[in-house]
Image (spheres, helix red, strand yellow):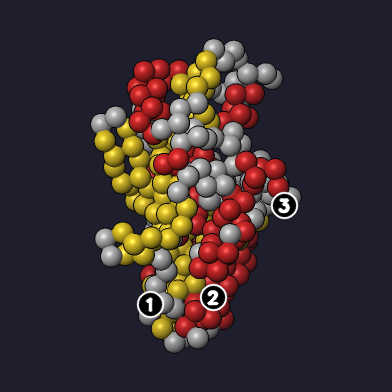
Amino acid sequence: MYPATITDYMAPTTLDECIQLLEQHGSQAKLIAGGQSFVPLLKLRMTDTSIVIDINRIIELQEFGEKNISQKRILRLGALTKHKTLATHPLVVSKYPILSDAAKFIGDVQVRNRGTIGGSLVHADPAADLPVPILVLDSTLRIVSREGERTVSADDFFLGIMMTVVEQNEILVNIDIPAPLPGTGAAYYKCCAVYGDFAIISVGASVTMTDDSCDSSRIYVGGVYPSPQRAVQTEAFLQGKAITDDILQQAADILADEIPVETDMRATAEYRRILLKEHGFKVLSKAIKRAKEDNI
């Protein structure tokens, strides 16, 4: 199916100009960056957009790198940061490898070259790759409108299937990720029908270790509805325990039991629980391995 008629295409060069256009045109206007989520919606006529606002020239959305904010070290990702950057940049690969783990799974080379982190997060597909690591890393997201700006925790950002807290007149500007604590490791894995496809199930975990004991963890599961789910019971089970393979297998069993899963066109609920046990163990093992390497 072909898209409905686009009557206007605009390409602002500043954030202020973009915000003014959003206010002026209301619900008829939609933002486009890499187009990897928006263009398919146009083709399927799942949006009645008649005005497209291209945000690729806005410098404020292109920030990338570590910086100190309020005496805390963070990684700042502008909304236009490409999937390819997350998959291959040495800073991400070495210090925030869960982002690299996830970005490598996204689509194919062409999609990774064009797609952006902002577009993926605002699109909020429950089976997408990036929401899980963004949640695991306890990120905050900066959203701007004519009324001003607000900062939202990743835990509060996703509202449901393709729904976030970003309003029609707002734009996601950047994502701030706190630098990992010493002795912290994080990892991501997904199961899908073919490489680059949407997740049947995905698991992300961050674990902070002292010697062989788990101080704390953050664990999320994607590929479930209406949005990624936090495994609070599994986190509570791991806290304070000396980590062994047996403990990790028990944690994976708890993970499979506590996360609500459904049957859909990709898999049955029963199969998803089997995958959660297997891949939950793998992800936790990999995160802990990275945490121990960080302690060396």
Give me the residue at 56% from left, 81% from top.
Answer: 245
Residue 77, horizontal then vertical, whole percent: 46, 51
As displayed, is residue 119 above or below residue 180? above
Q: In whole angstroms, how far apart are the C-alphas of marks 2 and 1?
A: 15 Å
**Of 76 and 157, the residue lying toward us:** 76
* Element class at badge 3: loop
**Earlier-in-chain disc, 3 versus 2:** 3
As displayed, is residue 293 above or below residue 97? below
User: On the rendered structure, is 233 left or right of 272?
Assistant: left
Identity, as a three-letter code, of the amino acid under mark 3: Tyr
| Mark identifier at residue 215 | 1
As displayed, is residue 145 above or below residue 5? below
Residue picked out by circle 3:
195
As displayed, is residue 279 above or below residue 164? below
Q: In whole angstroms, how far apart are the C-alphas of marks 3 and 1?
A: 34 Å
Q: Residue furthest right?
A: 194
Residue 131, horizontal then vertical, whole percent: 49, 50
User: On the rendered structure, is 266 left or right of 19?
Assistant: right
Identity, as a three-letter code, of the amino acid under mark 1: Asp
Q: Quadrant of the N terminus?
A: top right
| Mark identifier at residue 290 | 2
Which mark is nearer the camera, 3 or 2? 2
Asked whether disc 3 touches disc 2, contact meaning CB atoms under 8 Å apart, the reply is: no
